[in-house]
């Protein structure tokens, strides 16, 4: 099929990535009549292609190209080449996610003001008024079909949830429910209602879970204003003598180097690939990488305070049945420094299949203690910790010039070490999670270390002042007016909530800004 947009068409907005940020932005701009070329490094997979098996699905969807790790985090030892579970496909990580969709609390937009001086943390307030986000959050919830918002009913509770809820209430918790999930629960929507198949991190075979792959992307394409070029790996962003972005170079599906001209470029490649691209776009004018006059590109990487707790009971739970993360306890999400840390955390239901359980329960573990735990898989209940970690300049993504990808480009090195606040929060969350299961008579409780994360944030953060970050309150880079960041890498702080809803809300807001600035002739 002939491409609708020519490589020399310099009127288009080029968006790099098609996940929660890039995919939504592409559709929102296309609906406004803006011409968009979306470049996606992965292929296109739809519900009929997804595999309801964790291990095979990983092979189908995951970004498995070389990455390196450093720092004190356990992931660097256990999974040195896999710092995160990121999807390489149209839809990005909206394909591999559970669907949890939670708004930030007001105080989390103003972390520096709220938490004060936290030694070793590089805290900033977001340059956004929380009240400005209310309408965008509502638009995002309606787009995603988030349960327990508007008039949308919640999901039913699985056995895993029933154990989780009973344990939470036994501990005195009150804010426990089946979550706010981007999963269809009724017949009157565009997507099939949830069939409770389980294994919900993988691509949803029913299309019940929201993903840009089969919602925003085809909606944008239907306008005639969006072209998605899959298997297109962007190498660098180009600019003119005035420092204005003029286009991008990318390797197409056949490995040929192409150049697409652009009026505006928006980077939405996740918190690893987005800073990597900006750093790989260094030039004589931008010797330290594009949009990096502050030196903040790649810095302040956050991944949330995570970890898991599994309880083994004397009767079967079969935690894999039903919706994976339709269960949340929010009592601990408050800011209460009397607990020994700033910020808060959520506890959410979780289940893994046997292959992933064997890989993540105790990486490198073996022997009777490990094998008997797996033998008790049918009787297991599980939960996941999601908490606000502290941004640190030293937690960062840099280029590893000693390792290159299939196109000869330096790969991302991910350096991370927990802040003492992160450790204190995780310790508290483990204690409370263990207490929930022990209150119900668990025969054994297993706290497990953090997995390679899907919550990757920061590295191109928002800031009011150019010296403190990479982009302004609209995701527009401080250095280059027609270059934007449109994914979770623009997060100033991480908050305690799963990030996807906020990424979507920011993308809708950014589309309004870009379209308005284009119409005014400012871009």
Image (cartoon, helix red, strand yellow):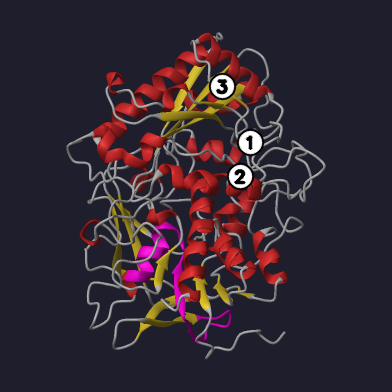
In this view, the residue in front, 121 or 115, is 115
Count of marks, rendered view: 3
User: What is the span of residues highlighted in magenta in the rendered image?
Assistant: 251-278
Q: Residues within 10 Å of mark 3 (few under 14, many from 20)?
A: some
Quadrant in which the N terminus appears: bottom right
Residue receiving disc 3: 176
In this view, the residue in front, 17 or 232, is 17
> Does residue 12 appear to the left or right of 126 in the view shown?
right
Q: Residue drawn at (67%, 44%), measured in percent from left and top?
A: 145
Disc 1 and disc 3 in contact, CB within 8 angstroms: no
Q: For the residues marked 2 and 1, what is the alpha-carbon distance in whole angstroms?
A: 7 Å
Sequence order check, earlier mark of 1 and 3 = 1
Quadrant in which the C terminus appears: bottom left
Q: Quadrant of residue 440?
A: top right
Which of pointers 1 and 3 indicates the residue nearer the eye?
1
Percent from the top left, x then y, of residue 290?
30, 73
Percent from the top left, x then y, of residue 224?
69, 76
Residue receiving disc 1: 149
> Would you place residue 415 above or below residue 166 in this image?
below
In this view, the residue in front, 14 or 367, is 14
Which of pointers 2 and 3 indicates the residue nearer the eye?
2
Residue receiving disc 2: 141
Element type at marker 2?
Answer: helix
Disc 2 and disc 1 in contact, CB within 8 angstroms: yes
In this view, the residue in front, 393 or 60, is 393
């Amino acid at each position: 099929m002939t491409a609708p947009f020519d490589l020399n068409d310099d009127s288009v907005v080029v968006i790099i990535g098609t996940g929660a940020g890039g995919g939504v932005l592409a559709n929102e701009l296309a609906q406004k009549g803006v011409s968009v070329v979306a470049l996606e490094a992965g292929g296109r997979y739809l519900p009929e292609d997804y595999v309801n098996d964790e291990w095979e699905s990983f092979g189908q969807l995951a970004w498995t190209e070389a990455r390196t790790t450093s720092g004190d985090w356990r992931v660097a030892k256990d999974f040195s080449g896999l710092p995160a579970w990121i999807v390489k496909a149209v839809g990005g990580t909206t394909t591999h996610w559970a669907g949890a969709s939670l708004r930030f609390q007001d105080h989390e937009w103003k972390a520096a003001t709220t938490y004060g001086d936290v030694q070793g943390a590089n805290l900033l307030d977001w340059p956004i008024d929380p009240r400005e986000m209310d309408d965008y959050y509502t638009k995002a919830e309606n787009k995603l079909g988030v349960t327990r918002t508007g008039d949308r009913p919640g999901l039913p509770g699985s056995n895993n949830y029933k154990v989780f809820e009973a344990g939470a209430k036994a501990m005195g918790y009150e804010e426990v429910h089946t979550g706010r999930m981007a999963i269809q629960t009724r017949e009157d929507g565009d997507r099939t209602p949830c069939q409770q198949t389980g294994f919900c991190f993988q691509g949803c075979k029913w299309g019940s879970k929201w993903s840009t792959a089969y919602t925003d992307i085809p909606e944008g394409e239907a306008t005639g204003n969006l072209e998605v070029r899959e298997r297109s790996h962007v190498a660098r962003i180009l600019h003119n003598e005035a420092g204005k972005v003029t286009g991008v170079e990318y390797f197409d599906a056949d490995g040929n180097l192409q150049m697409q001209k652009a009026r505006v470029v928006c980077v939405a490649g996740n918190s690893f690939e987005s800073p990597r691209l900006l750093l790989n776009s260094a030039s004589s004018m931008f010797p330290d990488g594009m949009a990096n006059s502050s030196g903040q590109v790649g810095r302040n990487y956050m991944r949330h305070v995570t970890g898991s707790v599994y309880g083994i009971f004397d009767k079967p739970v079969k935690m894999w049945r039903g919706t994976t993360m339709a269960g949340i306890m929010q009592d601990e999400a408050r800011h209460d420094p009397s607990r020994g840390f700033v910020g808060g955390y959520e506890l959410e239901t979780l289940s893994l299949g046997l292959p992933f359980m064997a890989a993540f329960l105790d990486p490198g573990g073996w022997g009777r203690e490990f094998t008997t735990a797996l033998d008790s898989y049918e009787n297991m209940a599980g939960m996941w910790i999601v908490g606000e970690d502290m941004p640190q300049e030293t937690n960062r993504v840099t280029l590893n010039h000693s390792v290159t990808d299939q196109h000869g480009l330096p790969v991302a090195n991910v350096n991370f070490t927990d802040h003492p606040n992160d450790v204190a929060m995780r310790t508290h969350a483990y204690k409370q999670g263990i207490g929930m299961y022990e209150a119900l008579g668990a025969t054994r409780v297993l706290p497990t270390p953090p997995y390679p994360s899907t919550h990757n944030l920061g590295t191109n953060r928002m800031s009011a002042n150019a010296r403190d970050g990479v982009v302004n309150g609209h995701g527009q880079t401080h250095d280059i007016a027609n270059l934007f960041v449109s994914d979770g890498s623009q997060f100033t702080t991480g908050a305690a909530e799963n990030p996807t809803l906020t990424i979507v809300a920011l993308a809708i807001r950014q589309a309004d800004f870009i379209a308005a600035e284009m119409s005014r002739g400012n871009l």
